[in-house]
Amino acid sequence: MSLLETVLSQGFDRSEPIGRDELGRFTKGVRVRCSQCEALVISGVAAHETGCPNVVRYVDCFECGCEVRADVGCDCQSFDEEAE
């Protein structure tokens, strides 16, 4: 997963790559932006403001105990539904 894909998956929906080399590849990094808050980077770690609705939250699955995104759910729950 590229750096841009990583920050997009963390809810920084307006992020964009910066800097290109002579072959047109992005080389300098990612400008971190969010449509719902003033996103910032602290010591190389992208952060949302407190209360931002774009923050990706993780929860523990009640079935298997795995940490999963709250908006996606766990794979073990889909396997249980198929078995029924």
Image: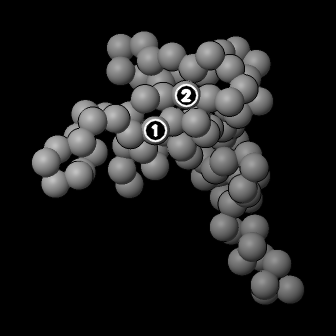
Q: Residue furthest bottom?
A: 83
Does residue 42 appear to the left or right of 73 in the view shown? left
At horizontal 57% and vertical 20% (from top left) the residue drawn is: 39
How did the renderer colour the structure? one colour
Q: Which residue is mark 1?
A: 16
Does residue 74 appear to the left or right of 81 in the view shown? left
> Which sits earlier in the primary sequence, circle 1 or circle 2?
1
| Residue type beneath disc 1 | Glu
* Nearer to the camera, 65 or 27: 27
Q: Position of residue 79 (x, y in %)?
A: 72, 77
State the quadrant of the N terminus: bottom left
State the quadrant of the C terminus: bottom right
| Residue type beneath disc 2 | Arg
Q: Dot 1: few (<14), some (14–19), or many (≥20) neighbours within 10 Å?
A: some
Q: Which residue is mark 2?
A: 33
Secondary element type, mark 1: strand
Q: Position of residue 77 (x, y in %)?
A: 75, 68
Residue 60 visible to an observer of this rendering = no
Rendered position, 80 above or below 27? below
Label 1, label 2: how far apart the Cα atoms are: 8 Å
Secondary element type, mark 2: loop
At horizontal 69% and vertical 41% (from top left) the residue drawn is: 59
Q: Position of residue 13 (x, y in %)?
A: 61, 39
Does residue 33 appear to the left or right of 3 in the view shown? right
